[in-house]
Image (cartoon, rainbow, N blue to C red):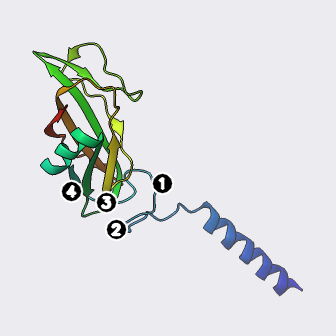
Amino acid sequence: MFVRSLAVAACCTLAAAVAAAPAPAQTTDTPVPGVQPGACTDTAAPTSGFSRRAARRAGRHNVLRGTARDVGCGLDRVGISVLKKKGKKCRHLTSRGRLTTATSCAHRRWLNVKGTSSWSFRLPKRLPNGRYVVRTRAVDFSGNVQRAHNKRLRLR
């Protein structure tokens, strides 16, 4: 009886020690979605962009398509910034599909795209014709942020 109670006590203290121990850090190369940034160690920034052909199609069909990739922990999200430049001021596209009043071009208003490695962004039909600057930016699960990639887009 004494041996049985000692075994039960040892079992309970071992279970309590395991429960109180910190969880081991996740070291997988491609974590599942929802993992907090920094859970995977990676130093390479992801890349994203779209082709000239995709820009021409976006001018006709109002859908901009592009790609993004990461060699380390995997892509978390991709963002896009659309602005209409006039002189030294810019009008930024909002999440409601409208252009803001003219402000500094240095300010960036990031909008989420649909998808990650192969993404698309629906442009509003009511955008005025003209030349736009589109910036894309990808973020991986490690928290690395791509330096914004600029391209021009013409809407007619």
Q: Is the residue marked by circle 4 packed among few (<14), some (14-19), or many (20+) residues within 10 Å? A: some
Q: Verify CB contact (< 8 Å) between mark 3 and mark 1.
A: no
In front: label 3 or label 2: 2
Residue bearing the label numbered 3: 41
Q: Which residue is farthest right?
A: 1
* Helix, strand or loop for disc 3: loop
Q: CA distance from mark 3 to mark 1?
A: 16 Å
Residue bearing the label numbered 4: 44
| Picture coordinates of residue 87, whole percent (x, y) | 10, 15
Residue bearing the label numbered 1: 34
Quadrant housing residue 88: top left
43 vs 20, nearest the viewer: 43
Whether residue 44 is visible to the viewer of this picture, yes or no, is: yes
User: Of the residues under marks 3 and 2, which one precedes in the sequence?
Assistant: 2
Q: CA distance from mark 3 to mark 2?
A: 8 Å
* Helix, strand or loop for disc 1: loop
Whether residue 51 is visible to the viewer of this picture, yes or no, is: no
Quadrant of the frame with the C terminus: top left
User: Of the residues under marks 3 and 1, which one precedes in the sequence?
Assistant: 1
Q: Is the residue marked by circle 3 packed among few (<14), some (14-19), or many (20+) residues within 10 Å? A: some
Residue bearing the label numbered 2: 29
